[in-house]
Amino acid sequence: MIPEQRTLDHIPVTQVLHALPEPAWMVTPDGREYVYNRKLSETFPVVERSREEQQSVLHPEDRMVLTEAFEQGLQTDREFSLTFRVMQESHAYQWYRVQVSPVMDQSRVVAWLGVIRALDDGHEVLQALIEHVPVGMALMDLNYQMKLVNPRLIEGTRYSRSEYENAHLQKLFPDTYQHVKPLIDQVIATEEALPPVEFEGRHAPEGQKPPHWQVTYFPVKSRDGRLIGVGSTTQDVTSRKMAEQELKENQEFLRRITEAVPAVIGLRDLKTGKTVFSNNYAAQVIGYTLQELEGMGEAEVVKLFPPEDLPATYQHYQSVPLLAEGEVIEREYRMKHRDGTWRWIYGKTTIFSRDAQGQALTALSASLDITDRKAIEEALRHSEQQLLRVMEAQKRFVSEASHEIKTPLAGIQGNLEVLLRFKDIPEEEKLEILQDCHREATRLGRLVTDLLGMAKGNADLPMIEDDVRLDQLVQDTFRELERTRGRRQMLLGQLDSCLVLGDPDRLKQLLVILVSNAIKYTPDGGTVTVHLLSGEKHIELRVEDTGIGIGEEDLKHVFDRFYRADNTAQGMTDPGGTGLGLNIARWIVEEHQGQIRLESQPGVGTTAIVTFPLLK
């Protein structure tokens, strides 16, 4: 290093500089004025140029370090040396050492003398390299004698460099020698470097924690490959260990706090996609342990989402690193529990930490299990839809029922008005009008009865569950309906003994509807037959008639409320049905977990087939 030239004419010894065989200079105690000899200007012609040009020939790594070390050395009254590299004409760098000594006058530093020498010896070059390594470095021979150490190694120790060099390792480190020696012996035996090991210092300044060192031992060989010693690099990792311990304590503190929160708290590394922190509540929500969650990469986490949700999931992952400071993303999503079920999650995500450039490093998320809430919402939606269907059905029912009631009433009212307006109507016509009124009144009575029955069914009244001897119920109902058969034949076919679970009143109502329909639509001389057939698991009720039958198009709607087929084409008068009987019959069958269907052929007859689960 060459300070800026001034005048030091007041110092008599400056004339001695030109007599020295090596490049030399002398500087004032404050480092501002100096003189140099001819040898220095011959060796370093750049000394005659500007300060910027002088700096340009120094190795980039040495410029700042050399300046700082020089200024620190001038603050003492002791000799010091510095090594540096200077670019030659070949653009290769040459190592130099400057030995800086104080010039004393009555115990006072009046000047500094610097003598520069090129380092051509391999040992000296190695020493210079070691001094510039940013970690502590040492070389020892095979007898554990220190040969070379750099300034970084002896920082903060009680030994000087001269005390270090040629000293035995045991003398320098009596506390750790027994731990270190086996490692050095292993390097000597295997001639291979060892993985880094960490040591904790035994002594520390009052109020401070003991230092931590990371040491790496490696073999040192001669040019011919012969082992000549063991080298070591020593790095002070105290700050890193303190940061790790602080992080561990912070994580433990955060974990204790978050364990009391009924939500999933997670911290995710945005570069690796891995979960670096999660509280135990996550295990309750999706069934995975903390270790399993923290070990999952992004690809494994993605598998926890439904395939159809992956596009939105990927979009979420991509948008998180782009969040502005304080910005939060909210979303609802599904995740697969360990048992295979899907859980609904509501989560908020924000950026937790950023690097010096402002790039997002980690993301913090807080999530709640809303599966129960979603189930309630779904149940409410289902109930609302069901209620809307019921309300629509009731609205339609009222409209249809009003229409059906008005029809017979209009017939009755019209006929009665004729009787009132015309007094001289022949008796035959009067009788015919009265018969029409009677028929419509009868139909109206049936309609009201069916409407009342349907209203009871729609009222969701509880079904009575009792053991019912269905064969006995068929016989009793059959006998009661025989009085209405007119000139039709009624037969009981195969009647197996069987027991079903159900409501006896509703089952009787079902039998009355099916048998009455068969009688009603069977002309005089026809036959109505009832069978009850018992199988292994089901009982089958069959009501057969030889009536007018039902067309294919009408057969599709026979169970629709108020639907009545037009039978005039078959030459049959209107039997006065309400169009509600089969609709009620189907409801009764379904309430008993059964099934009902009709098979029919126009002009041949109809068969109603009902199946129930068999109790016995």
Image (tube, rainbow, N blue to C red):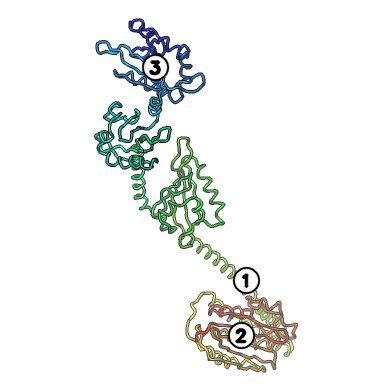
Residue that badge 3 annotates:
116
Please give the name of the residue rendered at 56% of the width and 88% of the height, measured from the top-left corner: 534
- Number of marks present in the image shown: 3
Name the side, left or right, on which 201 lies relative to 301: left
- Assess whether mark 1 and mark 2 are in contact (beta carbons under 8 angstroms): no
Position of residue 529 measured from the top left corner of the image (x, y, whole percent) = 63, 91
Q: Quadrant of residue 199?
A: top left
Check the image and report above or below for 89 versus 134: above
Check the image and report above or below for 93 versus 189: above
Image disc number at residue 283: none
Return the disc, 2 or 3, that comes first in the chain's sequence: 3
Name the side, left or right, on which 28 lies relative to 480: left
Residue that badge 1 annotates:
399
Position of residue 151 measured from the top left corner of the image (x, y, whole percent) = 34, 28
At label 1, the amino acid type is Ser
Q: What is the spatial separation of the Cα atoms under label 1 and label 3, in whole angstroms? A: 116 Å
- Assess whether mark 3 and mark 1 are in contact (beta carbons under 8 angstroms): no
At label 3, the amino acid type is Ile
Q: What is the spatial separation of the Cα atoms under label 2 and label 1, in whole angstroms? A: 26 Å
Q: Nearer the viewer, residue 211 or 511?
A: 211
Name the side, left or right, on which 112 lies relative to 564: left
Q: Nearer the viewer, residue 320 or 44?
A: 44
Image disc number at residue 514: 2
Position of residue 33 measured from the top left corner of the image (x, y, whole percent) = 38, 11
Q: Nearer the viewer, mark 1 or mark 3?
A: 3
Q: Secondary structure at mark 3?
A: strand
- Assess whether mark 3 and mark 2 are in contact (beta carbons under 8 angstroms): no
Q: Nearer the viewer, mark 2 or mark 3?
A: 3
Q: Nearer the viewer, residue 377 or 140?
A: 140
Q: Nearer the viewer, mark 2 or mark 1?
A: 2
At label 2, the amino acid type is Leu
Return the disc, 2 or 1, that comes first in the chain's sequence: 1
